[in-house]
Each structure stands twice: as structure tokens, then as C-alpha cells.
Amino acid sequence: PIANADIELLPFPLTFANSDAGGNYTMNDVPTGQQVILATAQGFYAKLAVVNVNAGQTSTQDFALTPQVGTVTGIVLDNFSQPVVGATLAVAGTNIAAVTDAEGRYTLGNVPVGAQMLNVSAIGLRSTQATVNVVTDETIYKDIYLQTPTGAVRGTVRNAANNQPIAGASILVGIPFGAVYYSAFTDANGNYAPDCVLTNLLTNGECGQVNNLQFGQPSVNLVWPEEARKG
């Protein structure tokens, strides 16, 4: 049932009514004879009906309104901007769903107009939700990013010759000989953690209170050869 639909008697609203939570409506004081009635509701196409009204009787006229729909399409990517194959997308509160292809692309058809919530998930990635505003008979493009679950690494960088900590050492995380995605710098004690940034190091000599970070075991100790440090 459609609640809050407007029912009007034409050619101009001589009388009107609104449907209740069950989609029911009643119009009183309708003139006898053939009458044209218009039914409208947000998100649906309007519909006309001709009803024959008899004196002292109640006529029944039901309406089946067609939803206004649009299309949503786009690409699902991971946080490295790589396409995600086999991701599942579903429009909340409906049976509309799609799965991304080999290029990470998806298409959701017959999506009701208005603001819709998309539930997106993929194996090995964090699920997310995305809101899209669907327009009647239009295709809306929406790319969605799924984040990779993360852990953490911490440790100490020391001089291999004398086992002394090295301050200001650069820690890079990424594809070997490729892009760097995360970085950190060691503090005055040679310690590093993912939130250790150069500005903090220069300001107070300590890196995000490394000793208080609970990243779990094992921790990683890196030792730089003396010749590498000098280079």
C-alpha cells in the first residue's frame, strides 16, 4: 500500500483525499455521474481513472501506481584504486542487487527514485554503505571504495655497529620498488609506529608516545648496517 497518496477530483480539485497507512482513501460529496479522478504520490507516476458515481451509493476505485525508477552504475575499488571483482551491492530495503564484473563494474536497474542506501561488501575487504540520489529515468554514476583491513607494525631501528638507536630513520611501507603507501620516522629512541610523523619528531623528539601503543606481538626490530646508514 502507498500512504499519503493524493486523490483529486478533476478537472480541478472539487474534493480531494489522502490515503492512510493501509493505502485506503475516502472522498465524500462527489457529484453523481462519470467523474475523473487523479491519484499521485511521491516517487510514483500519476494515474487517472474514470468512475461512475451513483446517488446515495459508494463507488470503489483502486489505483496501482507505477514506481519511478532510475539506474545506478559505477566501479567498486579498493583503497589502492584497484577494481574489486565479485563485490556485492544491494539497495537497502529492496531485492535489487548486483555483483561487480572482472573490471569492478556494477549496474543496478529499476532503483526507486530518491535517496537510496547501497550496502556494499566483498571477501577480504571492509563492508561499507553509500548513499545515492536516484533520478527518474536517468543513470547515476557512483564509484565506491572498500578499505582493506589493516594491522600495525612497530619496532626499533639500531646501528648494527654499536647497537645504538637511530633517530629520524625513515620507515616506508609499500610494494617493493613501487608505490609507498605508509611511512613513519623513528623518534629519539629509535622507535617507530604508524602514527609517527616527521613534524612530531621535530617538535618533541618523541614519536606519538610509542611505549603506550598497543599493537600486539610480535614487534619488529630493524638494524641498519653502518655503511647503509652513512649512504
Image (tube, rainbow, N blue to C red):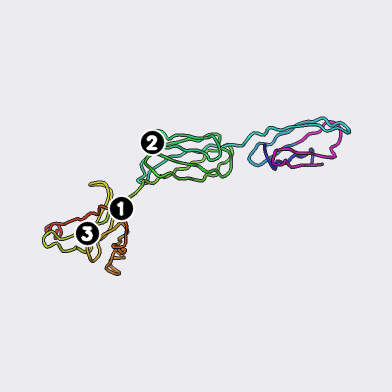
Q: Is residue 120 above or below residue 52?
A: below
Secondary structure at badge 2 equals loop
Q: CA distance from mark 2 to mark 3?
A: 38 Å
- Assign the magenta stretch its main secondary structure: loop
Tell me the tag on residue 180.
none
Q: Which residue is mark 2?
A: 85
Q: Earlier in the sequence, mark 2 or mark 1?
A: 2
Is residue 50 magenta-colored? no
Tell me the tag on residue 152.
1
In percent of the image, x 76 and y 40: which residue is there?
8
> Which is in the foreground here, disc 2 or disc 1?
1
Q: CA distance from mark 2 to mark 1?
A: 26 Å
The image quadrant of residue 127 is top left
Q: Residues within 10 Å of mark 3 (few under 14, many from 20)?
A: many
| Residue range (magenta) | 15-37
Tell me the tag on residue 156.
3
